[in-house]
Image (tube, grey):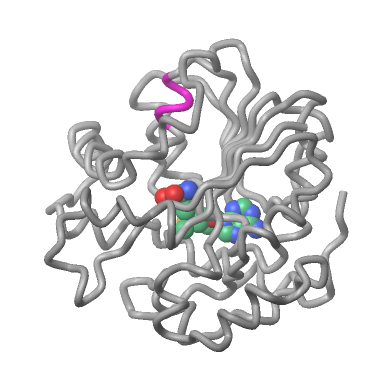
Amino acid sequence: MNQSSPAQPRVDQKNAQFWDELYGTHHAKQLGIKDHSPESLARFDAWFFDYYPYLLPFLPMDGLATKDVLEIGLGYGSLSQRLAAAGCRFHGLDIAAGPVAMAAQRLEQMGLRGDVRQGSILAPPFQPGSFDWIVSIGCLHHTGNLAAAIENVHSLLRPGGHALIMVYNAASYRQWILQPRVTLRQVFSDKKAYANSHANTQMTNLYDRDSSGKGAPATEFVTKAELGHLCRAFARCRIWKKNIGGARHLFFIPRRIRLLLGPVVGLDLYCRLEK
Ligand SMILES: C[S@@+](CC[C@H](N)C(=O)[O-])C[C@H]1O[C@@H](n2cnc3c(N)ncnc32)[C@H](O)[C@@H]1O
């Protein structure tokens, strides 16, 4: 498995603190959710899967029943619960205590089985070749080492195993509007030379903030070509662009209509992989 850099422990520590506040807390507040009862979580999940309508169709939920499935980066646990409810042997991994506690609570109160652990995908507490499926939505680009995280996903899969990962698109409408020159440079740079050198704080803060307004400790942005290169060890790799946010001038256009532009200049890259 890939070894991490000397600076990694500090990034891990900051990530464990920052993400302890569940990703989705802001939306839960907007929905008026004040507890973690099954009813409140069902309301949150209805919002989550409606807001990201393209997410579940990427996964063969009916075919997971006998599979070992690992989810990395659990957040509010909406997908964790769905995966466990699909009857797979569910394993969850997150660097922060909050998401681990939330996923464990969900499994317990829904009577579902699963193994949820606190730890990092950069030093995963599993043997290579342990999983048939790995799912990681919006997580690997926050680890501080996207390339190593993808290598570890490859290593943890069994031969013929599948993965779905979502990472941020470095050439979305947001980058083209706010930093066209940086974007142009990254789009035309050598994909083989990718190193997390393009991220900047201004851009990072537009993506993930906690309730105090602080941005995520580490965020990487990749082009479709760079992501394809980072995934070169896999036998198959297909990437789709998805998701358009609700910033100022777009706010009044209904989300369903905005999402039509996702495949062209979307914020997120969804990547289906086969080992
Ligand atoms: C933006 S949230 C996404 C949560 C969820 N997948 C979703 O789509 O709502 C990122 C998650 O990745 C987790 N994370 C960050 N770095 C990690 C690492 N090195 N290993 C495992 N999980 C990590 C965070 O704790 C957080 O729960």
Magenta stretch, overall SS: helix
- Quarter of the image where one finds residue 26: bottom left
Residue 3 percent coordinates (x, y): 87, 60
Left or right: residue 104 compared with residue 190: left
Residue 128 percent coordinates (x, y): 84, 35
Q: Compared with residue 265, is residue 66 higher up or lower down, i.e. above or below?
A: above
Q: Residue at x 68, y 53 (%)?
A: 120
**Residue 4 visible in the displayed image:** yes
Left or right: residue 168 compared with residue 4: left
Total residue callouts = 0
Q: Is residue 223 magenta?
A: no
The quarter of the image holding the C terminus is top right
Pick the front one: 124 or 167: 167
Residue 247 percent coordinates (x, y): 25, 73
Q: Residue at x 77, y 52 (%)?
A: 123
Stretch of the chain drawn in magenta: 81-85
Q: Compared with residue 122, is residue 164 higher up or lower down, i.e. above or below?
A: above
Pick the front one: 30 or 261: 261
Q: Compared with residue 262, is residue 109 higher up or lower down, i.e. above or below?
A: above
Q: Residue at x 57, y 71 (%)?
A: 219
Residue 124 percent coordinates (x, y): 75, 46
Q: Residue at x 31, y 72 (%)?
A: 211
**Residue 99 visible in the displayed image:** no
Left or right: residue 42 compared with residue 121: left
Pick the front one: 169 or 167: 169
The extreme top residue here reads 66
Pick the front one: 152 or 15: 152
